[in-house]
Amino acid sequence: MSVVQAGPMTGQSQTKSEEHKTRLPIDLRSDTVTRPTPEMREAMATAEVGDDVYGEDPTVNLLEKRAAEVFAREAALFVPTGTMGNQIALKAHTHHGQEIICEERAHILHFEMAMLGWFSGCVPRAVRTNDGILTWEKIRANIAAKIYYRAQTGLIALENTHNMWGGAVMPRETLEEICHEAHALGLPVHLDGARIFNAATALGRPVAEITRAVDSVMFCLSKGLCAPAGSMLVGSRAFIDRARALRKALGGGMRQAGVLAAAGLIALEQMPLRLHEDHANARFLAEELARIPGIQLDPASVRTNIVIFEITTGPTAGELSQVLLRQNVLANSVGARSLRMVTHRDVDRAACAAAVGAIKAALQSPQA
């Protein structure tokens, strides 16, 4: 039952839920800000739990089983974060003193606290692209020659979708060529698939099909799939056995984690079905933003739920972000003149339109 109170300054009545809704910002910083659905909250409250470090949490076990089935893999592991999942995989595939080939703007390179050096004892071999999509031709040119005084290539790490390239989607054929050639050289391939369900939605193919060639995949439950926390690592049984030990080494044993896994199950089973809505809203954002003088953006490049645009005149990205904040619109700068917006379940089309209006007003302001 709603509690009615006097509206501030107006004397009009409004419910607490309505007042709360009006206070919520239009939060386009990331899809990590998504809130769990009512079904998730109910499932969390009633979840059957046990000690996962002992392998006794039935809800975690079910989530791991279902993730393995969805990706057509032998096994899966529930981890607290995507960063932990990626770093466990890098460690499991390599040994100290090796190089890891990745794209120049890869998440594992820029946003994971240099853990590939700290934890795995490896160094990155960053490869520049024009669109975030690594190809075998580019990778082959960066594989270390078999010389004893040169650090050897230990792993190829891919990212799909590619965060800092505006949610770019790797074509399945490109990924499979990389894996085929890498495996011929005895090199494993790990996929940072934090938003792999967005890639699958864009490609119109199941995640199992578009990831079948890689050796391991990490994907997030807590981004567009709306779970409050958690990511998954999938691969062979031997790989996951190794990964489980590494998770414990990083302090990732979560004991009665079934309360989180219950939400993760709903995220895995239900939430991919609505990701096309986020993609449509992102394309709407891109098309509307591209019409604003002072913004550089190709709407055709927006295939999933991430929109990155350049501000060619007026304020810097940081300054525009601060102006938008005062208008209750949240967006992150990702460069001196680049702003990123990410659509998700908690931002509808009307909110996207309001964000465009706030940006247009800010850029047309005399202070801009």
Image (tube, helix red, strand yellow):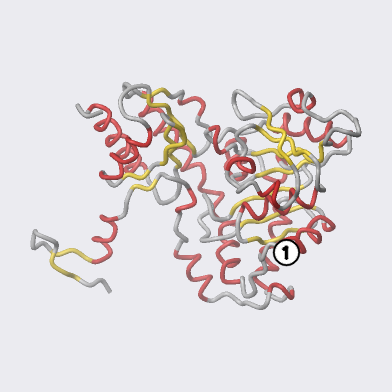
Q: Which residue is mark 1?
A: 249
> Residue 22: image x %, image y %?
25, 55
User: In the rendered image of this protein, does residue 99 appear above or below residue 255?
Assistant: above
Q: Residues within 10 Å of mark 1 (few under 14, many from 20)?
A: few
Frontmost residue, 168 versus 275: 168
Quarter of the figure that contains the C terminus? top left
User: In the rendered image of this protein, does residue 149 appear above or below residue 92?
Assistant: above
> Residue 142: image x %, image y %?
77, 27
Quarter of the figure that contains the N terminus? bottom left
User: Could you tell me how many numbered marks the image carries?
Assistant: 1
Q: Is residue 280 left or right of residue 222?
A: left
> Residue 312: image x %, image y %?
37, 22
Frontmost residue, 303 versus 257: 257
Residue at x-position 65% and y-position 71%:
59
Residue at x-position 66% and y-position 33%:
103
Q: Amino acid at mark 1?
A: Ala
User: In the rendered image of this protein, does residue 17 appear above or below residue 334?
Assistant: below
Residue at x-position 57% and y-position 74%:
47
Q: Is residue 339 left or right of residue 120?
A: left
> Residue 180: image x %, image y %?
83, 33
Q: SS of the residue at dot 1?
A: helix
Tell me the quarter of the picture where residue 193 sits.
top right
Q: Is there any visible trace of residue 175 in the rendered image?
A: yes
Tell me the quarter of the picture where residue 281 sits.
top left
Q: Is residue 264 left or right of residue 329?
A: right
Frontmost residue, 142 versus 135: 142
